[in-house]
Amino acid sequence: MADTVVGANPDPHAAGEDPNRRDFIHIAATVAAVGAVGGLAWPFIDQMNPAGDTLALASVEFDLNKVELGQQVTIKWRGKPLFIRRRTGKEIAAAIKDDHADLRDPATDESRHKPGKAEWLILIGTCTHLGCVPTFGGGDFGGWFCPCHGSHYDTSGRIRKGPAPKNLVVPDYAFLSDSKVKVG
Amino acid sequence: MSGHSNYEPKTGFERWLDVRLPIVRLAYDSMVDFPTPKNLNYWWTFGGILAVCLAIQIVTGVVLAMHYVPHVDYAFASVERIMRDVNYGWLVRYMHANGASMFFIAVYIHIFRGLYYGSYKAPREVLWILGCVIYLLMMATAFMGYVLPWGQMSFHGAVVITNLFGALPVVGPSITTWLWGGFAVDDPTLNRFFSLHYLLPFMIAGVVILHIWALHVPGNNNPAGVNVKSKADTVPFHPYYTVKDGFAIAVFLIMFASFVFFNPNALGDAVNYVQANPLVTPAHIVPEWYFLPFYAILRAVPDKLMGVLLMFGAIAMLFILPWLDTSKVRSMRYRPTAKLYFLIFVVACLVLGFCGGKLPDAHVIPGLSTFTLIDADLNSMVWLSRVSALYYFAYFLVILPVLGLTETPLPQPESISEPVLSHSANAPAGAAASPEKRG
């Protein structure tokens, strides 16, 4: 049968006798199709990531005079609660005393506040376990207690007990003056 | 859908249509003439009940979407408007909300039926896996639907569940940000959940068609678990099972209606009638009842990633079950030892559900403090969850693989007709009746 075909058609390529050329066309067409679909898939995946206006979130300024000693004020920042806690001397002392205790996510108390501002602890108020909002002053260590799955944080916001893996997160912030902070 | 067709077009139009689109033939072969084992009991009616549940959810859902506003500022109010102002809105919403619970009641019975009678075994593995896919889609749909009213439980449930993905190493935080479309559960999250909540039921409907197709190739399993041997073992689906399913659907709908009209909020959580507040988490976060066993497994594990993996692993067990069970005997009627382990398995699932609804540190026996084992009191929900979760996984990974090799099953009947027709062989069927009641 092959003889008949070659005899009838002097061009061997047209009869599909050159496997390399035919393979190339198949592979090139497949790659082009997969590439096109893959390239189009990305916009459809990436559209779910935060949009431009969501990313362009304004930072928050906060007047610290609103917080009494031993109090905490919760404000909303980037859709999440932000804890601004004015710690008492006793709470600071307790936090420093535990700097070298058996910590799951080791950090000194000094690394969790701005230099010379030990009184002010500013943290993102979502539990590092599954994102619930811990309650002020609860738990075995006097810091916060997460009602969802029972994580205990100390007065430095460090995880001490329960399922959460990390300390409460310290956001980027700066003191604009003694009584004003800018978060974000 | 398979095999020989007995359909004979009766009218001129049917003959004309049959050579162009044999859709009447398809319906006739799969819903009228389909040969069905003649010994199916009422546990086999839940397939039909589930089809009705899906139809109710889609119809009521489409109506609710006409009045609902997927925006963080309006969602809660629009649901309250549906309840108070939209004509019969209260009825449609209560049907939809309770319909989700009814759907899960039926699907759990359907799954336990399959587990007891070995409906996952060859040649029905694909049928079983498609069922597992439907179950996964149902869970995703129910979860996203529960977020839409934007109550406190909606919001914080969404926070907890989306944060589960954050437990994955390296990619976790990017995935949660991607799911949220922001840095927290917010308006973009609500919008996409609404879109997907509308889409997924139609995907479920698609997989249901595949599920029924995969059912009609090998045909129904049956309580005896033996293959259909002859025409004497079957009856046509219509009228025998259309009537039986119809009766079961009517009884089921009475139960459904009793919730909708007399106790519409019994299965929900009162806290979800408080509008979402991202700054305050409710004191006791619980998912809807149908997720409680998995929630208990999540909380039983002290490590975040392991907890998440075990929770998803609990569902993965169902997918690989056809290759874990080494027994060739399908029905547990003829596996007295397996029947016992199955009963304990059902109890373990119920206990997990019970624990999932309680605080982890709560006492199982009130007022009794024993001693602290590792991280919690032995008399606590955490430890009860751990024991039950251990049994859950052992049932799939140890008991079923080993039991199939070591047990001595009872003699199986030669055919489906044999135990039905001969009086003496009715004994094993009667003995199986009591455990079924508890499934």
Image: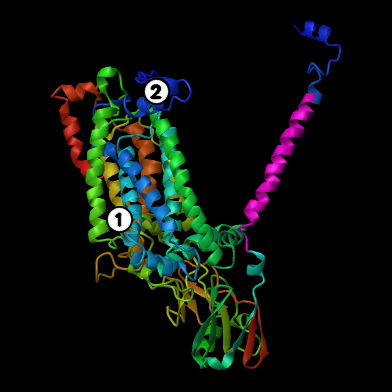
Q: Is B397 colored magenta in this rendering?
A: no
Quarter of the image with the C terminus of chain B is: top left
Which numbered marker is on residue B351? 1
CA neighbours of label 1 inside 10 A, class few (<14), some (14 to 19), many (20+): many
Which residue occupies 22% across, 22% down?
Answer: B417
In the rendered view, tell whether residue B195 sits above or below residue B78. Answer: above
Alpha carbons under labels 1 and 2: distance apart: 55 Å
Picture quarter with the N terminus of chain B? top left
SS of the residue at dot 2? helix
Give percent across and percent down for residue B43: 26, 39
What label does residue B14 carry, if any?
A: 2
Q: Main secondary structure of the magenta part?
A: helix
Q: Which mark is residue B378?
A: none
Point out the frontmost of discs 1 and 2: 2
Question: Is A14 on the left or on the right of B416, as rendered?
Answer: right
Query: Magenta residues?
Result: A22-50
Amino acid tagged 2: Glu
Q: Is residue A4 left or right of residue B347?
A: right
> Residue B89: x, y in percent?
35, 61
Closer to us: A164 or B40? B40
Q: Position of residue B187 (x, y in %)?
A: 54, 66
- At 24% from the left edge and 25% from the top edge, which residue is drawn? B411
Q: Is residue B403 left or right of residue B366?
A: right
Q: Earlier in the sequence, mark 1 or mark 2?
A: 2
Q: Is residue A49 magenta?
A: yes
Write the residue at 23% across / 51% down: B255
